[in-house]
Amino acid sequence: MSSPISSVSSASSNAATTTVNDGDAELLSKDAFLKLLITQMQNQDPLEPMDNSQTIAQMAQLATMESINNLNDQFTINAGLQSMSTALGMVGKQVTYTNADKASVTGIVDKVSMESGVFYLEVDGTSVELGDVTSISEAPVAEE
């Protein structure tokens, strides 16, 4: 039979392999954190159970981690909506953009499309990435 310490160490090793890299910070995934907590509880010494304050602290960490993940998801959604709103607001406007030859081109935005999360404007029949736009102005009024 394995000792509680080696079981917890084994669970720690397994959880460590399911970490998520976020810049320089290394965080346990939600599932890995729960697995580690369950393993700790299953393998605790019945004569010396885990301190309630430790359990509460770990549950608070889990709740905090979940809240941060939810906020991050909302920020991502909001950024996408803002980009979409910006792109749609350009329809009918005159824009200047930098083309592949690094030349400055001006034209009227006819429509907006999205491919793989990137917004493109159709400017006088040319597909232009939203990030390549350098200026926006009202389209000149055609005189009759």
Image (spheres, rainbow, N blue to C red):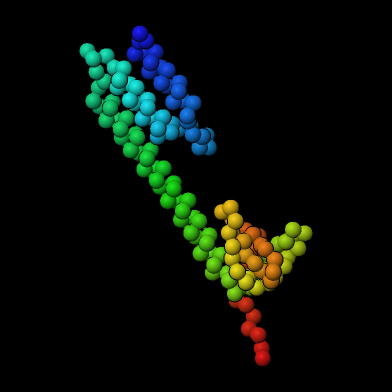
Where residue 115 sits in the image (x, y, percent)?
60, 56
Asked where in the image residue 96 lies, by quadrant, the reply is bottom right
Q: Which residue sits at x=34%, y=22%?
A: 39
Residue 63 location (% of width, % of height): 33, 38
Q: Residue reaching furthest top?
A: 1
> Is 21 left or right of 48, judged from the image as shown?
right
Task: Check the image and name the residue furthest to the front.
Answer: 1
Residue under the point 64% across and 80% down: 140
| Identity of the residue drawn at 42% across and 17% down | 10
Pick whichever, 35 or 62, lies toward us: 35
Which quadrant of the structure image shows residue 32?
top left
| Numbered marks: total | 0
Q: Tell me the residue at 72%/61% (across/down).
A: 99
Quarter where residue 133 is shown? bottom right
Could you tell me residue 3's position as x and y percent?
35, 10
Quadrant where the image shows the N terminus: top left
Which residue is at the far left? Answer: 47
Instruction: State left or right for residue 48 relative to residue 4.
Output: left
Q: Relative to 22, is 49 above or below?
A: above
Of 128 and 54, the residue lying toward us:
128
Q: Position of residue 59 (x, y in %)?
A: 30, 32
